[in-house]
Image (cartoon, rainbow, N blue to C red):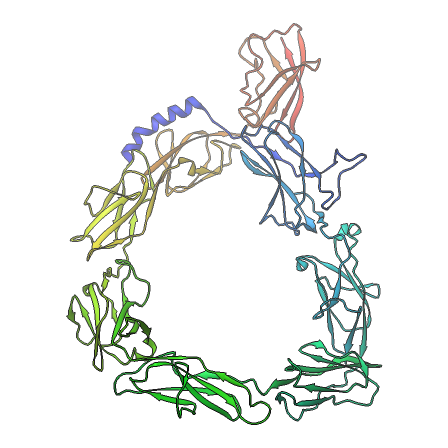
């Protein structure tokens, strides 16, 4: 490697000395500020943005300083969140035609979700990529609600009669309702005109008073007009209203039951409710209610509500009244039953009816003597069965319910269907379980009845691989975990005198290994050394192939020499399955990844030093003009003038950077030059902190104010030998400036 360097360095230095030093100019972006709206007469820069559906037009002034941005540049105005954070900045405007205009305005509309006091703005340029300082904070609100709000007591359908009560020192919740996205706003809540501290869409009220609310639009609140209706909250005491336990809660048709409130004779007003709806009008001392079971729909939850002087509006707990003629019947056995010769089956039901009677039916006809909750059938009594359950005695005796039906069959044969227990793909699984998925009882007419749940554990099984019995595989499932078990599987089943063989299931498992490949580098240098790629798996004796971008490479090398960019992977074949490795992406090398924290022209005061640090490489070497290695770290400290070279390495790639170190001039800008051709003081030579700098602008004016020189990167070459000075002593004026300020200005006297 070192020998290669000694051949390269002289050529690099010659190129460096011929081309000189290149420095990069930097624009200055100033913070954006509000501007007048030219479409409004007599306007001035806005101090808060109070937008709405009828007005949302604002202007922002932006200035920046040379040098010029690139021709493809765009200026983008961005908005922070309400706290001034730009983590999720919102684009407000974008301009691509202001790349030669140092002072212009953006026209913008604020987003409809904008609400807060601390929004800030900034401007980004895209070419080069730069960001301005952020603006001062501004209040910004999009007033999308400009009509009165509606509030109510939580749990009510609406604001009712505009009153609410707080009982026994407890609290109630008042809330804004019927407002889309109510939780995204902040609010001002008032109690009898006094502003409260709560800001959410609901508050807890514990004191009496007149409550209302409005949306808090901050500095823009005067534009909202959102003040809500009033809720008059009063306080009172709870009396503990309840309904006395009734004689019975299950009624037959025609029966009645009187519900009696536990508080009577106090002049209170009563309202009775069923299932949450009032069934009586508010009436003084109406402390009882009669439930009539002859009225359709009498079943439900009954409550009583009271109110009166000094008492809170209070509703009792519910008493549930049911229809005694309503009951359930539940089938216990499976919906499909198979009856084998000599193996009768029992059908049964359960019910919550009181004193029920039973009658079983087969194919729609009553079964003689079958009047219990169960029935036993044999293989000659196939058909469709159900039981009718009826009530006995009283006015509920006319009610009956039929159970769900049960299909009873005696099969001519059975059908076994095997399947994979989980998702399976050939060469995709490293293990799989095969199981009996379905057992069908097949009748003589070919019809099938699914009897899996009742018979899956009744068969005797024998699994086969490639037609050969597997020892010990006599369960209704089999687990396969190794490639040696690949093959075609089926299962035989025996039940009583029945024999059945399932369908066949092919199984091809892959080896349970992961293949990992790595490379010596993830970048490739055109014309450089190849990148080596290896597998952690020993490939000796393996059947494998290397692929790039999905195409097979014509090589059998265990270690792959990579000499082209792309996406690489290794495919190993075992047991008829391809095992695919991870992918490694080899990218082309980009020498712009090597950067330095200093321009190529390193300037420092004589007697001091300047440290330059490089980044982006994996190794570094610094050389002087004599090809002497100065440092092998990522930085070097310059103490003397001269020409230097940095060689940065990334993998097998090398990047060469040339640098020049020179002392900072200590002399001042001269104000007198003598252009007499003697080679001494014939040119206006300024310190190198100003000359040879593409970011510094040199301007010279005549004594009449005429601009005679205006250039960046001044080369200490004014005046030219052809310049004519008609007077003996002439005075010129100069300015030395960068993009932000004037660095130096004064006069130059030409003595001829």
Choose top left, top right, bottom left or bottom right for residue 70.
Answer: top right
Residue 212 picture location, percent across and down: 79, 63
Please give the name of the residue rendered at 26% of the width and 58% of the height, measured from the top-left corner.
Answer: 426
Choose top left, top right, bottom left or bottom right for residue 171.
Answer: bottom right
Check the image and report above or below for 565 versus 707.
below
Check the image and report above or below for 87 versus 7.
below
Q: Is residue 269 visible?
A: yes
The number of discs equals: 0
Horizontal arrangement in the rendering, residue 333 relative to residue 220 (left or right): left
Q: Quadrant of the C terminus?
A: top right
Horizontal arrangement in the rendering, residue 540 relative to residue 750 (left or right): left
Residue 560 picture location, percent across and down: 24, 44
The one of 213 and 402 positioned closer to us in this rendering: 402
The one of 538 and 465 positioned closer to us in this rendering: 465
Q: Which residue lies furthest to the top in this view?
A: 726
Check the image and report above or below for 52 versus 62.
below
The one of 293 and 94 positioned closer to us in this rendering: 293
Q: Residue furthest front?
A: 365
Please give the name of the residue rendered at 39% of the width and 24% of the height, measured from the top-left corner.
Answer: 15
Residue 60 picture location, percent across and down: 69, 37
Q: Quadrant of the N terminus?
A: top left
The one of 307 and 79 positioned closer to us in this rendering: 307
Residue 580 picture location, percent across and down: 28, 52
Horizontal arrangement in the rendering, residue 455 relative to residue 45 (left or right): left
Horizontal arrangement in the rendering, residue 9 relative to residue 123 (left or right): left
Please give the name of the residue rendered at 29% of the width and 44% of the height, measured from the top-left corner.
Answer: 550
Q: Is residue 133 visible?
A: no
């Amino acid at each position: 490697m070192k020998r290669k360097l000694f051949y390269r360095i002289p050529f690099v230095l010659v190129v460096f000395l011929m081309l000189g030093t290149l420095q990069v100019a930097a624009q200055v972006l100033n913070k954006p500020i509000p501007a007048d709206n030219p479409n409004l007469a007599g306007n001035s820069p806005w101090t808060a943005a109070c937008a709405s559906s009828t007005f949302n037009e604002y202007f922002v002034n932006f200035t920046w300083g040379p040098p010029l941005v690139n021709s493809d540049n765009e200026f983008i105005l961005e908005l922070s969140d309400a706290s001034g954070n730009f983590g999720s900045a919102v684009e407000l405007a974008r301009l691509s035609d202001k790349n030669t205009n140092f002072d212009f305005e953006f026209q913008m509309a604020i987003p409809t979700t904008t609400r807060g006091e601390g929004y800030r703005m900034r401007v980004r340029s895209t070419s080069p990529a730069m960001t301005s300082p952020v603006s001062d904070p501004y209040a910004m609100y999009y007033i999308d609600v400009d009509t009165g709000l509606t509030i109510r007591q939580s749990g009510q359908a609406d604001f009712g009669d505009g009153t609410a009560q707080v009982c026994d020192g407890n609290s109630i919740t008042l809330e804004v309702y019927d407002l889309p996205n109510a939780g995204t706003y902040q609010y001002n809540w008032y109690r009898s005109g006094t502003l409260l501290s709560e800001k959410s869409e609901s508050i807890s009220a514990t004191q009496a008073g007149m409550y209302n609310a409005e949306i808090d639009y901050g500095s823009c609140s005067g534009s909202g007009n959102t003040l809500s209706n009033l809720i008059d909250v009063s306080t009172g005491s709870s009396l503990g209203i309840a309904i006395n336990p009734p004689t019975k809660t299950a009624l037959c048709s025609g029966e009645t039951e009187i519900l009696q409130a536990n508080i009577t004779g106090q002049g209170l007003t009563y309202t009775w409710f069923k299932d949450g709806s009032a069934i009586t009008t508010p009436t003084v001392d109406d402390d009882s209610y009669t439930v009539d079971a002859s009225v359709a729909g009498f079943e439900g939850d009954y409550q009583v509500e009271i109110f009166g002087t000094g008492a809170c509006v209070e509703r009792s707990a519910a008493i549930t009244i049911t229809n005694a003629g309503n009951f359930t019947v539940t089938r216990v056995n499976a919906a499909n039953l198979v009856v084998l010769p000599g193996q009768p089956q029992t059908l049964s039901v359960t019910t919550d009816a009181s004193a029920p009677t039973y009658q079983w039916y087969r194919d729609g006809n009553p079964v003689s003597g079958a009047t219990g909750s169960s029935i036993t059938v044999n293989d000659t009594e196939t058909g469709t069965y159900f039981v009718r359950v009826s009530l006995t005695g009283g006015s509920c005796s006319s009610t009956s319910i039929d159970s769900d039906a049960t299909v009873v069959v005696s099969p001519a044969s059975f059908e076994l269907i095997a399947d994979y227990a989980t998702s399976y793909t050939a060469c995709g699984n490293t293990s799989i379980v095969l199981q009996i998925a379905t057992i069908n009882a097949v009748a003589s007419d070919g019809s099938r009845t699914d009897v899996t749940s009742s018979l899956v554990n009744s068969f005797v099984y024998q699994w086969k691989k490639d037609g050969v019995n597997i020892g010990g595989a006599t369960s209704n499932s089999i687990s396969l975990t190794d490639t040696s078990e690949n093959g075609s599987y089926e299962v035989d089943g025996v039940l009583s005198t029945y024999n059945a063989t399932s369908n066949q299931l092919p199984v091809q498992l892959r080896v349970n290994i992961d293949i990992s490949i790595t490379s010596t580098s993830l970048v490739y240098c055109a014309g450089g050394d190849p990148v080596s790629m290896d597998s952690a798996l020993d490939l000796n004796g393996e059947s494998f192939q290397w692929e790039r971008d999905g195409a097979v490479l014509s090589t059998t090398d265990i270690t792959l020499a990579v000499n082209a960019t792309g996406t690489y992977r290794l495919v190993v074949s075992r047991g008829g399955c391809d095992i695919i490795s991870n992918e490694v992406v080899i990218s082309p090398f980009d020498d712009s990844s090597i950067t330095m924290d200093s321009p190529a022209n390193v300037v420092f005061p004589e007697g001091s030093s300047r440290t330059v640090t490089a980044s982006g490489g994996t190794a570094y070497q610094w050389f002087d003009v004599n090809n002497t290695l100065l440092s092998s770290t990522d930085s070097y400290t310059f103490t003397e003038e001269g020409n230097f070279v940095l060689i940065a390495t990334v993998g097998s790639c090398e990047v060469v950077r040339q640098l020049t170190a020179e002392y900072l001039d200590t002399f001042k800008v001269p104000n007198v030059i003598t252009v007499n051709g003697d080679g001494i003081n014939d040119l206006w030579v300024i310190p190198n902190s100003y000359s040879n700098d593409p970011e510094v602008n040199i301007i010279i004016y005549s004594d009449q104010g005429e601009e005679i020189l205006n250039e960046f990167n001044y080369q200490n070459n004014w005046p030219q030998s052809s310049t004519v000075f008609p007077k003996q002593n002439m005075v010129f004026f100069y300015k030395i400036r960068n993009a932000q300020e004037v660095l130096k200005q004064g006069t130059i006297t030409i003595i001829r």
